């Protein structure tokens, strides 16, 4: 049984999926205004509200850098409020 030919959109989606799961795919580290970190495919622009904070590198390397850097999970707004309360 033969399969129908793939459209260019299906081929592009397949290539993108492969590029994200490939062990050597390039990723970047993103950070938002609350100090939250995330990994993001290097081939795509960061979403609104996020900026580049590292990379490009492999996903595992980016995750390792985040684990080393992001030691305080509290949002920036909470940390600021706690500092203000402590100094009052």
Image: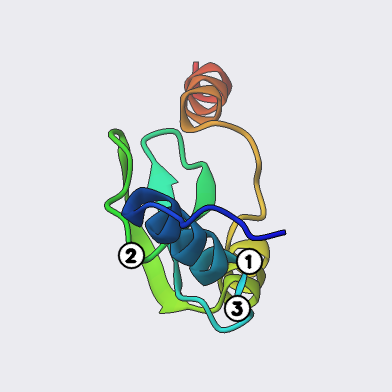
Q: With respect to residue 44, does 27 lie above or below?
A: below
Tag 1's secondary structure? helix
Q: Image point 42% across, 60% down: which residue?
A: 11
Q: Residues within 10 Å of mark 3 (few under 14, many from 20)?
A: some
Q: Residue furthest front?
A: 1
Q: In terms of secondary structure, where does tag 2 sit?
A: loop
Where 49 falls versus 31 (above or below)?
above
Extreme bottom residue here? 24
The residue that appears at 56% across and 84% down in the rendered structure is: 24
Identify residue for label 3: 61
Comparing marks 2 and 3, which lies closer to the viewer?
2
Residue that carries the numbered disc 1 in the rendered image: 63
Q: Which of these two is toward me, 1 or 74?
A: 1
Which badge, 2 or 1, comes first in the chain's sequence?
2
**Image x and y of residue 55, in percent:** 41, 74
Of callouts 2 and 3, the N-terminal one:
2
x and y, in percent, of residue 35 in the image: 47, 42
Mark 1 touches mark 3? (CB < 8 Å)? yes
Q: Identify the residue at image location x=60%, y=76%.
A: 22
Q: Give the residue pinned by disc 2.
A: 43
């Amino acid at each position: 049984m033969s399969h129908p030919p793939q459209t260019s959109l299906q081929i592009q989606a397949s290539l993108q999926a492969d590029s994200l799961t490939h062990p050597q795919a390039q990723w970047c580290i993103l950070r938002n205004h609350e100090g939250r970190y995330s990994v993001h495919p290097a081939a795509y622009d960061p979403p609104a509200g996020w900026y580049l904070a590292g990379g490009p590198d492999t996903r595992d390397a980016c995750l390792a850098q985040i684990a080393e850097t992001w030691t305080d999970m509290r949002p920036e707004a909470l940390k600021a409020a706690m500092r203000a309360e402590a100094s009052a």
